[in-house]
Amino acid sequence: MSVSKPVKRVTTHILNEMKIRGEKIAMLTAYDYSIARILDEAEIDVILVGDSASNVMAGFDTTLPITLDNMIYHAASVVRAVKRALVVVDLPFGTYQGNSKEALASSIRIMKETGAHAVKLEGGQEIVESVDRILSAGIPVMGHLGLTPQSIYKFGTYVVRAKEEEEARKLMEDAHILEKTGCFALVLEKIPAKLAEEVTVSLKIPVIGIGAGMKTDGQVLVLHDMLGITQEFSPRFLRRYHNLYAEIKGAVQAYINDVRTQQFPNEKEQY
Ligand code: KIV
């Protein structure tokens, strides 16, 4: 009789131990049950239900329009598929900035209605009150600094952040503030590799990079980008592991052709 081994879940503590041991952390986004199941079976460490769903799932230009209800729908679908990975959910724009009570209420909804394990917020000093309040309810928080897409209208572009000394100093300060407040991990997006390395070395919590070089404790990519489903988005940091756009299109065209030429279904494919 074969007894299947119980799956050891990835926790925030395990991520911390991985940093101490120098083991790299692999994180990807997912927004639905079927994909999350594949990622989890492949043994991804962290699944991020990112507000990038606003772009890749809903077709908006920015991450700003996605709502808390939308995020809860995506996150609950992901959680139903996951047995092993840590599931982190982005708090969407407008649900935590400037109002710690609302930040806590939004996070509680995510935890209660989705079964996810942690939330992620963009920003440093300016959101510390919200981070603190969420943490006080026992909800783990992941920080996000550097290019923070929810502030795109403030930045004006998606170019590399913190290249100048003053912004780099502020980012380093913010990273330490977030660690001190109690964040269990930090995402650094699109900043110089040297700065990302300095932040990673100076923090005890794991630092996950996207466009932040080789020396962070782990990496994250948007799944639709790394699988080549999205076409227009081609920053230098993005490695495409597949060209699924072309593959899916080719398969759909083959199906259309089979239907039109009456090659599908055949005799074996009927009752
Ligand atoms: O929303 C998202 O996918 C993210 C990653 C880019 C880190 O925040």
Image (tube, rainbow, N blue to C red):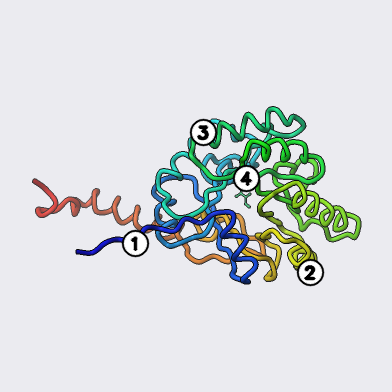
Tell me: residue 189, above or below residue 200: above
Residue at 79%, 56% in the rendered image: 161
User: Disc 2 marks which amino acid?
Assistant: Lys
Mark 2 secondary-structure assignment: helix
Tell me: residue 202, above or below residue 158: below
Image location (x, y in percent) of residue 6: 37, 58
The circle on residue 112 is 3
User: Disc 1 marks which amino acid?
Assistant: Lys
Q: Which numbered disc, 2 or 4, marks the residue closer to the eye?
A: 4
The circle on residue 194 is 2
User: Disc 3 marks which amino acid?
Assistant: Lys
Asked whether the viewer can see residue 230, the reply is no
Q: CA distance from mark 1 to mark 4?
A: 27 Å
Which sits in the foreground, 10 or 151? 10
Q: CA distance from mark 2 to mark 3?
A: 39 Å
User: Disc 4 marks which amino acid?
Assistant: Pro
Residue at 44%, 41% in the rendered image: 77
Q: Earlier in the sequence, mark 1 or mark 3?
A: 1
Q: Earlier in the sequence, mark 2 or mark 3?
A: 3
Q: Quadrant of residue 206?
A: bottom right
**Label 3 crowding class (10 Å Cα cut-off): few <14, some 14-19, many 20+?**
few
Q: Which numbered disc, 1 or 2, marks the residue closer to the eye?
A: 1
Q: Which numbered disc, 1 or 3, marks the residue closer to the eye?
A: 1
Mark 1 secondary-structure assignment: loop
Q: Quadrant of residue 122?
A: top right
Q: Which residue is mark 4?
A: 140
In contact (CB < 8 Å): disc 3 and disc 4: no
Q: Which residue is mark 1?
A: 5
Q: Which numbered disc, 2 or 3, marks the residue closer to the eye?
A: 3
Asked whether the viewer can see residue 191, the reply is yes
